[in-house]
Amino acid sequence: MDANRAQEILEQSSMCQVTCNGEQVYIEHVDRDQGLATIHPLSNQ
């Protein structure tokens, strides 16, 4: 997942569908310095 794009999605006011490796996920946090995003699968909620 591209960290910059993940940050853009996280900052949007509306919820949008995001997939990672074919699975829908929720983006919790983005660390642009490390190029990492903390995500959680929606199927586990």
Image: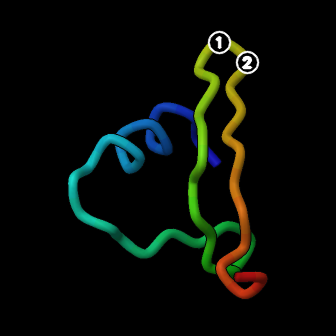
> Which residue lies most toward the top here?
33
Residue at coordinates 32% horizontally, 41% vertically from top-left?
11
Q: Quadrant of the C terminus?
A: bottom right
> Is 5 on the left or on the right of 26, as rendered?
left
> Is 14 on the left or on the right of 23, as rendered?
left
Q: Residue 12's mark? A: none
Residue contact at pointers 1 and 2, CB within 8 angstroms: yes
Residue at coordinates 73% horizontally, 18% vertically from top-left?
34
Q: How many marks?
A: 2
Q: Position of residue 17 (x, y in %)?
A: 43, 75
Residue at coordinates 69% horizontally, 80% vertically from top-left?
22
Q: Which residue is mark 1?
A: 33
Q: Nearer the viewer, residue 17 or 29?
A: 29
> Is 36 on the left or on the right of 19, as rendered?
right
Q: Nearer the viewer, residue 13 or 34?
A: 13
> Which residue lies most toward the left here?
13
Amino acid under label 2?
Gln
Q: Which residue is mark 2?
A: 34
| Disc 2 secondary structure class | loop
